[in-house]
Image: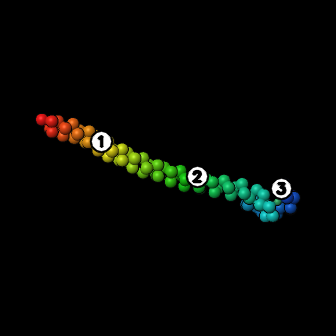
């Protein structure tokens, strides 16, 4: 038994388990939070990576289409004008 540094309740020490207080959850939140944040971070990184890549690809395709369209229009206008003037 060990007194909880947070609320003073005697903590029962279980072998193989991290020391934690079941009354105020002292020391329980820290390992749980780390575990949760790592798994979340891994998922977030994975999601951000795949989302960012697909978004980047989409933007590249959109930019390519816009550039092609703009170039096509730019080339078509002077040709049409020149033909009508002749
Ligand atoms: Zn406590």
User: Residue tagged by mark 3?
Assistant: 6
Is the CB of mark 3 within 8 Å of ligand 1? yes
Local crowd size for mark 1, using a 10 Å CA cut-off: few (<14), some (14–19), many (≥20)? few
Label whose residue precedes the other's in the sequence (1 or 3): 3
Measure the alpha-carbon separation of dots 2 and 3: 29 Å
Label whose residue precedes the other's in the sequence (2 or 1): 2
Which image quarter is the N terminus in?
bottom right
Closer-to-camera residue (60/15): 60
Q: Is label 1 or label 3 in front?
A: 1
Residue that protrudes farthest toward the front in the picture: 85
Proximity of marks 2 and 3: CB atoms separated by less than 8 Å: no
Q: Which quadrant holds residue 78? A: top left
Proximity of marks 2 and 1: CB atoms separated by less than 8 Å: no
User: Residue tagged by mark 1?
Assistant: 70
Q: Which quadrant holds residue 24? A: bottom right
Which image quarter is the C terminus in?
top left
Image coords of residue 16 (percent x, y): 73, 60
Q: Is label 2 or label 1 in front?
A: 1
Helix, strand or loop for disc 3:
loop
Q: What residue is at 42 percent from the left and 47 percent from the top?
A: 56
Measure the alpha-carbon separation of dots 2 and 1: 41 Å
Label whose residue precedes the other's in the sequence (2 or 3): 3
Image coords of residue 2 (percent x, y): 85, 58
Number of numbered discs overlaid on the protein picture: 3
């Amino acid at each position: 038994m060990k007194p909880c540094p947070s609320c003073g309740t005697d903590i029962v020490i279980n072998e193989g388990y991290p020391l934690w207080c079941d009354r105020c959850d002292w020391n329980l939140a820290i390992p749980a939070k780390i575990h949760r944040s790592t798994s979340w971070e891994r998922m977030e990184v994975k999601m951000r990576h795949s989302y960012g890549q697909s978004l980047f690809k989409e933007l590249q395709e959109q930019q390519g289409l816009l550039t092609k369209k703009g170039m096509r229009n730019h080339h078509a206008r002077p040709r049409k004008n020149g033909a009508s003037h002749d």
